Image (spheres, rainbow, N blue to C red):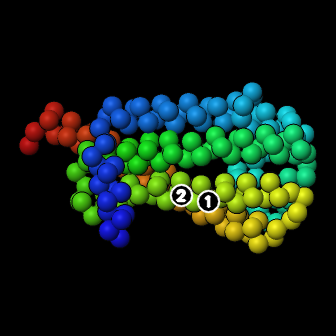
Amino acid sequence: MRVLKKISNCFKKISSGKYVIVFVLLFFAVGSLMESSFMGSAKLRELSGGTGMIDMRFCYSPKTAYTMLTNMGAPGRAFYAKLLCLDFVFSVFFMFANSTLITLLLRHIKADSRFLLLNILPVLRSIFDIFENCFLFIMIFLYPRKLTAISIISTIFTSVKWSIYGIALAVTLALTAILIYKKSVKKIDAQYPV
């Protein structure tokens, strides 16, 4: 718990409007590359006859994962490995963008300090994403050898990653809604004082 508080406090120190904007722009830049036709998932689909990224599914069986790797062919698997390297960068920028944004929103709504640990959600999501990528690398580099246990561990990391992502997104939207509500109430109170 002490480590989580330290990480949370680090984001508290760097959470200002300018840093949030920089991290969000970097996040969108890397995200755009990951979706682009020359370097991203669109290129993977082109190289692999329509097979997408395994880690974009919520979960998958070992059979599904290895069928997708087979359908990718050697060029698709090599490209997917490169795309996973870019996904490491994406994970880091997502973590910084979302953690600083959550911290900034908590500050603006004057939330109780106990809620500050919510800014750890994107960190956890990125950790699971990085582990997922490591296990997918193992599957790619050892292909055609099929390691069921590695695939099962990979899908667990994938499912947890997507679950935490959903929670972090819900928290971000809820905090944004609370901030908008508070600003609206404050504006109405200023216009119509009692």
Residue carrying label 2 = 127
Q: Position of residue 24 (x, y in %)?
A: 46, 35
Q: Secondary structure at mark 2?
A: helix
- Quarter assignment of residue 32: top right
**What is the distance, in whole Å, between disc 1 and disc 2 at their CAs?**
6 Å
Disc 1 is placed on an element classified as helix
**Is 26 placed above or below 4 here?**
above
Check disc 1: other Cα within 10 Å, few if <14, some if 14-19, many if 20+.
some
State the image coordinates of residue 182 (x, y, percent, origin top left): 26, 45
Q: Position of residue 6 (x, y in %)?
A: 31, 60
Q: Quadrant of the C terminus?
A: top left
Seen at 44% across and 42% down, the residue is 97
| Marks 1 and 2 in Cβ contact (< 8 Å) | yes
Mark 1 residue type: Phe
Q: Which residue is mark 1?
A: 131
Q: What amino acid is found at the position of numbered circle 2 in the picture? A: Ile
